[in-house]
Amino acid sequence: MSERDTEYSRHSVWTRLDAVDSALDGAEEQSASPSAAAVDIQQRARAVLRHVRSVLSRSDPALVPMATLTAIDGALQKVLPELRSFAASVDEQHLVNTSDLADRCA
């Protein structure tokens, strides 16, 4: 494995994607009877992030600038507080914000 491959596979974006997946799970569990809109937003955010993970995992590390991974990681850092806020307040606006931020990752 080349140094570039190692740097790519150890980038914090992978850990952050896992953290967002866990936070989405927590948000789903926290909402006892979510509205149809909340479910749709959560499913869409999860689908966008699943797509990002899929694209990154299939990409050639030599072709993806580290700045791109860092930018995605930065967007994901903003997703986590929104999901935590939703879990605490069950205010659906936090899910809307989550979805908007997830779009920045794609």
Image: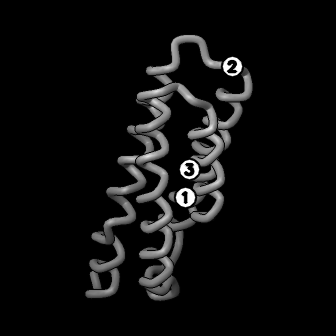
Disc 1 or 2, which lies upstream in sequence? Answer: 2
On screen, 40 above or below 9?
above
* Residue in the picture at 46% in, 57% down: 78
* Residue in the picture at 52% in, 73% down: 59
Tag 3 residue: 50
Q: Quadrant of residue 2?
A: bottom left
Residue at mark 1 to residue at mark 2: CA–CA distance: 28 Å
Instruction: Give the label, 3 or 1, closer to the camera.
Output: 3
Residue at mark 2 to residue at mark 3: CA–CA distance: 22 Å
Instruction: Give the label, 2 or 3, closer to the camera.
Output: 2
Q: Amino acid at mark 3?
A: Arg
In the image, taking residue 4 as reference, residue 33 lies left or right, namely: right
Please give the label number shown on residue 35.
2
Q: Amino acid at mark 2?
A: Ser
Q: Quadrant of the C terminus?
A: bottom right
- Tell me the element at label 1: helix
Please give the label number shown on residue 54.
1
Q: Residues within 10 Å of mark 2 (few under 14, many from 20)?
A: few
